[in-house]
Image (cartoon, rainbow, N blue to C red):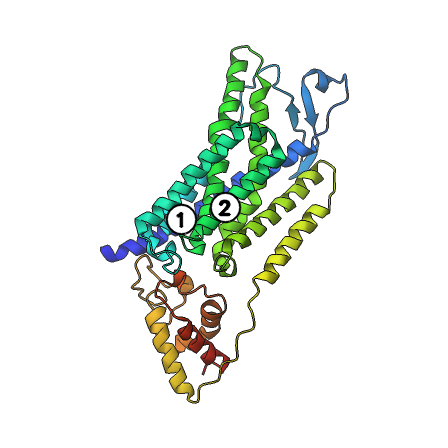
Amino acid sequence: MEYLIPYGLEWANLLVRWLHIITGIAWIGASFYFVWLDNSIRPPAPGSDLAKKGVSGELWAVHGGGFYNPQKYLVAPAELPKELHWFKWEAYSTWLSGIALLTIAYYFNAQAMMIDKSVADISSWQAVGIGIGTLVVGWTVYDLLCRSPLGKRDLWFGVVIFVLIVATAYGLTHVLSGRAAYIHIGALIGTIMVGNVLMLIIPGQRKMVDAMSAGRTPDPIHGQKAKQRSVHNNYFTLPVLFIMISNHYAMTYRNDRAWLVLAFIMAAGVFIRHFFNLRHKGRVEWRYPAIGVLLLAGVAVAIAPSKPAAVAPAADPAAAFATVQAVVAQRCVACHSAHPTQAGFAAAPLGVAFDNAAEIHQNAEKIYKQVVQTKAMPLANLTNMTDAERTQIAAWYEAGAK
């Protein structure tokens, strides 16, 4: 039955990843909607019935064939509604499924997914410990800074948090594989976001509801603190969404300065998000998306692959292919096979196998791009492919992959 363990993990990976995407859409969608709503509501006319009821803003919207009229109270309504919806399980479910996915995909297979011996020769337990420690320490530092005097200065607080996250990325890329470093920065941001919901936003809302239930006027400070953390979460969303998909783009995390690439992409996400936040308030500031686009363009240019050096074609194509096939068998087939032998893999990644000559020829372009151009494969260079072997693959491909 032991041979079924990788297969079971593969199914767990699939189902938990699916759940993570579903709950993530629900959470981030709700976050985007309420930030848009908060920025789009307009105050009622002075002396109107709404103003007398304590409504600070409202708007009219049409969707799905119906009209909606959301209203926001400055502190709270005069009476507590019988039914009150709490937006919390979207956040909790996203984080819990994300941690489960991190455990299945990375912690259960740390040697393949987290460790790059060319970066740091550490054990699986050390890699997992660094990952978990990053989440715990990161949330603690963020929360303490929020509660410090710095937390009252939004701009400077944002700059400090951004610098600390980039510094963390720098540190992680020097002890973990680039892919694992990126995913842990995403997990750190996600932990901060759900920590805001669990530790401050929801408790603050409970205190307001409890005050109303006891016939007291709620303290507006709880709403103000919750709003601040909610705004933080809003600016975190685009960076964390990029990190969620980054494992598909080795050109970013396999770069020698992967931490700096991540810093520029995250900054671009923040500027673009800021544009939409202002736009919802009626202000159109095109400089912010322009800065974001320039940052992304700058990254694209900076990490563009250089033209490979000309490689003399082999005099004997058959011998050249035999050499390449031997390299692929030694460095790639452990994972890319109909029956992988690498721990943690029940099937060939993306269904790509190199068990025979026909399969190698069929996937020649993929091999060239992943092995030579981006050096994304072998994963974390687990099988220690040398530059000379990559050059041999390049020569074979550029000669027509014969």
Residue 100 at least partly seen: no
Q: Is residue 343 left or right of residue 73?
A: left
Name the disc covering residue 15, or none.
Answer: 1
Would you place residue 280 above or below residue 172 in this image?
above
Q: Is residue 188 left or right of residue 63?
A: left
Rendered residue at 50%/43% (across/down):
24
Indicate the position of residue 354 as horizontal and vertical percent values.
Answer: 37, 72
Quarter of the image for residue 5 reads: bottom left
Identify which residue, 239 or 90, lies in the foreground: 239
Rendered residue at 68%/21% (across/down):
55
Residue 134 at least partly seen: yes
Q: Secondary structure at mark 2?
A: helix
Give the CA distance from mark 2 to mark 1: 33 Å
Q: Is residue 232 left or right of residue 91?
A: right
Indicate the position of residue 77 as horizontal and vertical percent values.
Answer: 62, 18
Indicate the position of residue 389 as horizontal and vertical percent values.
Answer: 40, 74
Residue labelled with disc 2: 167
Under mark 1, the amino acid is Leu
- Mark 2 or 1: in front is 2
Identify which residue, 120 or 266, lies in the foreground: 120
Q: Earlier in the sequence, mark 2 or mark 1?
A: 1
Q: Secondary structure at mark 1?
A: helix
Rendered residue at 55%/50% (across/down):
263
Question: For the C terminus, which image quadrant?
Answer: bottom left
Under mark 2, the amino acid is Ala
Identify which residue, 26 or 233, lies in the foreground: 233
Name the disc covering residue 113, or none.
Answer: none
For label 1, count other residues whose C-alpha is less than 10 Å away and answer few (under 14), some (14-19) or many (20+). few
Toward the left, the furthest residue is 1
Identify which residue, 226 or 80, lies in the foreground: 226
